[in-house]
Every structure is written in structure tokens, then in C-alpha cells.
Amino acid sequence: MTMTRPMTIEQPARLFAQREHGELIRGLNRIRDLACSIGHVPTAEVSDGVITVVHWIEHTLWPHLAWEEHWLYPEIELRLETPWATRAARFDHGQLRERSDRLRFDRLGLTADLHGAREELRGDLFGFEALVRAHIEREEQFLLPLLDEPVTTELDPAAVAPV
């Protein structure tokens, strides 16, 4: 006979994710502001803004996504005993990597003064922002609540002290 014992995760992991998401939203607001400024500020200023965005992606967004992939998603998969709950979120991460590469490419187009480069960059900034915002919303609505689900572990009845 096996017994199961519910194990719950401490609230700090969920609070950590929510705090991180708040910080990401501030970065996304700066991305939106940069996209809105295109056509109203000099190209050099836009180019500097893209450098700042890429730095934010590499030093703020990527570490957060790494935490999700190496701790949050495995924890959710363990609780639900399936990887399917996190598949869409992992797919988002791949799309974000591709879109960040496009932003780097767009900046090169700006510096080379290619026709349509500003418009392309503007669209890619808005697209990147929208994708990250949607990703955060899905996590907060569908994945983070799963941290409240208990994990069951098989216990050896001989190891359990009698009541």
C-alpha cells in the first residue's frame, strides 16, 4: 500500500514571478515608447534606443526566461505530471528569441539608412512588446495558479510513523 502526501510550494516563488513580471512591464513600456518615437526623433537616437532594448533583453528578459525554463516550467510539469501545460509558453520563448534577432537586424538597417528600415523597426518593436505582454498574461492567468496544485509523492508506509 502506498500513501500520498501533499506538498505545496511556498508562496515566494509565485511572488517572485509576479515581481519579475512587474519589472518586465516597465521594460516593455520603454520599448513601446521607443516604437512611438520613431518618426519624431533622429535616427541616431532611435539606434541608441535599440541598443538599450537589446541590452534589456539580454540582461533582464533572458535571465527571467531561463528561470522559467529551468525552474518554473519543470515545477508545473511535475505537479501536473505532463509537459503539455507549458508547451505554449516554451513556444513563446522561441518566438521571442527570433524576434530579438530581428531587432538587431533592424538596427543594422537603420545605420545603413535602408529604405523602410524605420517602419520595419517600429513594427518589430510593437510586435515584440505584444508577444511579451501576451506571454506574461498567459503565465499569470494559466501557469502561476498551477503552483497552488499539490505535488504527490509516493511514500513507503513503513517509513511513516503511526498516528
Image (spheres, grey):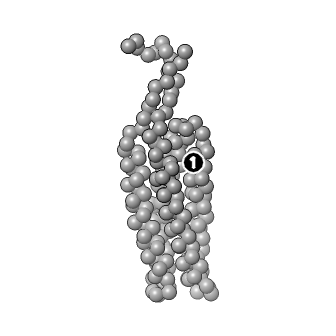
Asked if one can make out residue 134 in the rendered structure from this viewpoint, the answer is yes
Q: Quadrant of the N terminus?
A: top right
In this rendering, the answer to whether 148 lies above or below 39 is above
Q: Work out whether residue 58 can be spotted.
A: no
Q: Residue at the spot x=46%, y=72% of the render? A: 31
In the rendered image, residue 146, in percent from the top left (x then y), is placed at 48, 43
Residue depicted at x 61% and y 85%:
116
| Residue in the image at 53% along x and 18% along y | 2
Residue 79 image position (x, y, % from top left): 52, 37
Q: How busy is the neighbourhood of tag 1: few (under 14 within 10 Å), some, or many (20 plus)?
A: many
- Whether residue 75 is situated above or below residue 3 in the rendered picture: below
Q: Can you give x and y, in whole percent of width and height, for residue 38 in the image?
A: 49, 83
Question: x%, y% of residue 162?
Answer: 40, 12
Q: Residue furthest front?
A: 141
Q: Amino acid at mark 1?
A: Thr
Q: Which residue is mark 1?
A: 86
Q: Is residue 102 above or below residue 45?
A: above
Left or right position of 68 against 19: right
Q: Residue at x 60, y 39 (%)?
A: 82
The quarter of the picture where the C terminus appears is top left
